[in-house]
Amino acid sequence: MLSIVLPAYNEEKMIETVVITLQQLLTKHKIEYELIFVDDGSKDGTWKKIQQVTDQYNHVVGIQFSRNFGKESAIFAGLERANGEVVAVMDCDLQHPPETLIEMYDAWCDGFELIEGVKKHRGKESIMHKISAKTFYNIMSKATGIDMKNASDFKMMDRKVVDSLLKLPERNTFFRALSSWCGYKVKIVEFEVAKRQIGETKWSMSSLIRYALNNIVSFTTIPLQFVTFSGIVFFLVAIVLGIQTLVRYFCHGAVEGFTTVILLLLFIGSVIMISLGIIGYYIAKMYEEIKHRPRYIVSHIVVSKEKMIQEKDLR
Ligand code: UDP
Ligand code: MG
């Protein structure tokens, strides 16, 4: 069975369309499936819609979070609930073309264990967005050793990969990179990002910055090495200036050089501040992990009638 995990945040208009599209496609290709909608604390009628489709259609499961926990948590909640021997994760706005699922499924049948959807092109973005996305993905690519530039959350995974992911204890997850980190036999499938049909993107600039910082910190300690690196650079500069100052002192009997002092103070001061900030960020993340809070809290679960019967039989 193929389980499809669909995180949904304020997607009331998309739910039914998604169910119908996927149902048609998967029945046509004779693939047994289940759809797992995770309502990530939506403020609109998403949950109502999910309840409605579980009533009307077979093979649907709905999970509702007690509040908005973010897409990463929603993906993991879906993975935990998935019963299939192969599991796909896709957006619930049909920006990930459903036909690609079939291509991925075929690759899985051919023995690949992790099939990664890679964007052919990134959609239309502003220049600022492009630059920041590029910087972020450069850092992430370095950290993971995988080219992350066009990576997406659109993936299909064998049960083995899902189980490995679920074993990871950390709370701050970055699904896109973690799945590759697990290893396994990987195949890359390219897809064209479709235009969003209804609704709008859920990402604001500030949420993207938070997302980027979070993921960099949860995946790499390079920023901490930046602290060490700048320390070394300033030590070298300090030696040069120290020698210069001493030479001046002995040769001309110094006084000049207030400018240098002020500049140095400003410069070193700001580097120390930045460094403390970076260290603080990591400490904050450690604090969060140590608290060991759950990734999410589920408030309701709904299951299609026929699924309930099936699962009872399994037990
Ligand atoms: N999403 C979510 N929780 C959030 C934000 C987004 O579950 O806090 C879901 C959203 O419903 C969609 C997917 O993540 O299915 C991708 O979101 P979106 O389309 O807004 O992102 P974009 O395609 O613009 O990158
Ligand atoms: Mg989208």
Image: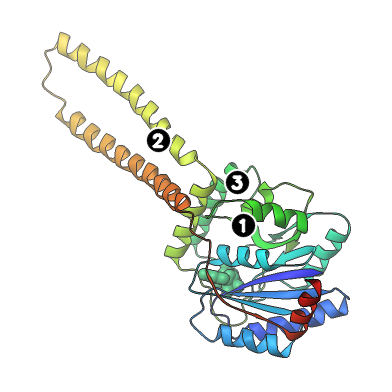
Q: Quadrant of residue 256?
A: top left
Seen from the viewer's position, the closer of residues 280 and 121 is 280
Q: Disc 1 vs disc 3: which is toward the camera?
A: 1
Residue type indicated by callout 2: Val
Q: What residue type is labelled 1?
A: Phe
Does label 2 or label 3 sit earlier along the sequence?
A: 3
Q: Which of the labelled discs sits on residue 239, or is there none? A: none
Q: Is mark 2 on a helix, strand or loop?
A: helix
Instruction: Find residue 263 and report its horizontal and vertical position in percent.
Output: 22, 34
- The residue at 75%/73% (across/down) is 98
Q: Is mark 1 on a helix, strand or loop?
A: helix
Mark 1, Cα crowd under 10 Å, few <14 / some 14-19 / many 20+, is some
Point out the tag, 1 or 3, that comes first from the N-terminus. 3
Look at mark 2 in the image and give the residue it sits on. Answer: 227
How far apart are the two marked residues, 1 and 3, measured between alpha carbons? 14 Å
Measure the C-alpha gap from mark 2 to mark 1.
27 Å
The residue labelled by disc 3 is 141
As drawn, is 81 to the left or to the right of 58? left
Callout 2: few (<14), some (14-19), or many (20+) C-alpha neighbours within 10 Å? Answer: some
Q: In this rendering, is residue 154 above or below 160?
A: below
Considering only order in the chain, which callout, 1 or 2, is on the residue closer to the N terminus?
1
- Find residue 2 and report its image quarter: bottom right
Closer to us: 233 or 260: 233
Q: Residue at x 88, y 75 (%)?
A: 29
Please state the horizontal and vertical placement of residue 15, each as a whole percent of the image.
64, 83
Q: Position of residue 100 (x, y in %)?
A: 77, 68
> Which residue position holds label 1?
175
- Nearest the eye: 234 or 174: 174
Can residue 254 be seen in this snapshot?
Answer: yes
The residues tagged by marks 2 and 3 sit, at their Cα atoms, a distance apart of 20 Å
Viewer-nearest of labels 2 and 1? 1
